[in-house]
């Protein structure tokens, strides 16, 4: 991938707010929803998100700026400085380091004078000569691959590639992050919402029973695939409940305010009440006070075992505008000096 600063079009001195602002603008411009079927736009969108994965994370940005990871978020090789340019040769490695490395090969070529090199004073000595192509060859038989693959676990410094060994596995691809909005009705019905990942891929998300607002679900193998051929990363999808016009979520329970008229509260009534699975009738008993909670069992959200409840709170609503008959009735009530509903504590 290109330099993430170049991808987002920001300077290396840009602060976190500037990086976030640049990312949001580009992500909006190249979002797959605005470029259906456009592979180039999808590739650009994936590149923008990969750049933000690094620069939007304080720790990863620091690692990239220090040269510890590359533009794909993979660790750079830190042990050697390379092979010293076109002519070959190790860089930044002192004599003691060479002694430690090559001591592992004592006796590897057999007895004294064997193909592995001459033995002098109990230490096997290896002599390398440069080949015309800039590589190095061990004098006395065998190429650099015989030794260096063992040193570097199959990853040859300077760009050469060997067979990976158990001591050095390929880097895993980066994880991708995304948010998915879900409706309460879809949760209750067990529907699988779709989410478009930063790489442009659209996948379905299986919501576990008892899923909570803000919960992060890991989708194995749906992240970035590294160029090195390592394991594919994961997708981390955060669930966001879409606000409902009627219901308020409290864990697995739902709350609903039910408007009732004055006559329904005084005389009682049966009122149709909406739930996530259809309407049910609720009985308002005569002389019901506003604020009394009615519990509808199992009409809430799914949870690990069963469902939550729907908590219905009647709210007495007076008619809008003047009502002469009601006003006259209330005047007679006031003249009758009925007991206060507030009790002595408010006197």
Image (cartoon, rainbow, N blue to C red):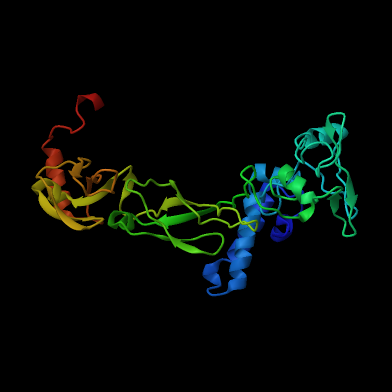
- Measuring from the top left, give residue 177's x and y in whole percent: 53, 52
Q: Position of residue 52 (x, y in %)?
A: 64, 54
| Front-lying residue, 174 or 267 | 174
Q: Is 37 situated left or right of 161 in this image?
A: left
Residue for point 69% across, 59% down: 1
Q: In this rendering, is residue 12 above or below 124?
A: below
Q: How many marks?
A: 0
Answer with left or right where residue 170 lies relative to residue 271: right
Q: Position of residue 4 (x, y in %)?
A: 70, 56
The answer to whether residue 36 is visible is yes
Q: Is residue 78 left or right of residue 166?
A: right
Residue at figure coordinates x 84%, y 49% from the top left:
83
The picture quadrant where one finds residue 343 is: top left
Quadrant for the C terminus in the image: top left
Q: Name which residue lies at 19% across and 51% down.
A: 260
Q: Is residue 40 above or below residue 64?
A: below
Which residue lies at the image location 15% right of the left edge and 51% below the top edge?
Answer: 326
Q: Closest to the observer: 74 or 212? A: 74
Can residue 157 be seen?
A: no
Q: Nearer the viewer, residue 137 or 161?
A: 137
- Residue 202: percent from the left, percent from the top? 48, 64
Nearer to me, 313 or 193 = 193
User: Is 289 situated above or below 32?
Assistant: above
Quadrant position of residue 125? top right
Q: Residue furthest bottom?
A: 37
Left or right of residue 316: residue 58: right
């Amino acid at each position: 991938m290109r330099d993430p600063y170049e991808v987002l079009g920001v300077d290396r001195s840009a602060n976190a707010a500037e990086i976030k602002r640049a990312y949001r603008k580009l992500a909006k411009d190249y979002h797959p929803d605005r470029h259906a079927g456009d592979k180039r736009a999808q590739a650009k969108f994936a590149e923008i998100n990969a750049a933000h994965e690094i620069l939007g994370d304080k720790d990863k940005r620091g690692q990239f700026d220090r040269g510890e990871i590359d533009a794909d978020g993979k660790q750079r090789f830190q042990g050697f400085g390379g092979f010293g340019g076109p002519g070959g040769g190790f860089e930044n490695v002192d004599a003691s380091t060479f002694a430690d490395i090559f001591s592992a090969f004592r006796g590897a070529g057999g007895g004294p004078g064997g193909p592995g090199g001459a033995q002098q004073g109990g230490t096997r000595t290896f002599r390398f000569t440069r080949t015309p192509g800039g590589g190095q060859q061990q004098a006395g038989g065998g190429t650099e691959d015989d030794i260096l693959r063992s040193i570097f676990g199959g990853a040859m410094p300077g760009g050469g590639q060997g067979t990976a060994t158990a001591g050095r596995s390929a880097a895993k691809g980066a994880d991708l992050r995304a948010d998915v909005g879900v409706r309460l009705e879809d949760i209750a019905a067990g529907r699988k919402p779709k989410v478009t990942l930063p790489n442009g891929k659209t996948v379905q998300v299986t919501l576990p029973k008892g899923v909570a607002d803000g919960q992060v679900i890991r989708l194995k193998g749906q992240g970035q695939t590294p160029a090195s051929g390592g394991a594919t990363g994961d997708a981390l999808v955060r669930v966001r409940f879409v606000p409902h016009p009627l219901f308020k979520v409290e864990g697995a329970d739902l709350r609903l305010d039910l408007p009732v008229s004055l006559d329904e509260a005084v005389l009682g009534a049966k009122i149709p009440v909406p739930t996530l699975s259809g309407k049910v009738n609720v009985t308002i008993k005569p002389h019901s006070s506003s604020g009394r909670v009615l519990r509808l069992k199992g009409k809430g959200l799914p949870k690990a075992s069963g469902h939550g409840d729907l908590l219905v709170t009647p709210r007495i609503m007076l008619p809008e505008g003047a009502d002469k008959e009601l006003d006259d009735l209330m005047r007679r009530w006031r003249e009758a000096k009925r007991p206060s509903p507030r009790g002595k504590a408010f006197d």
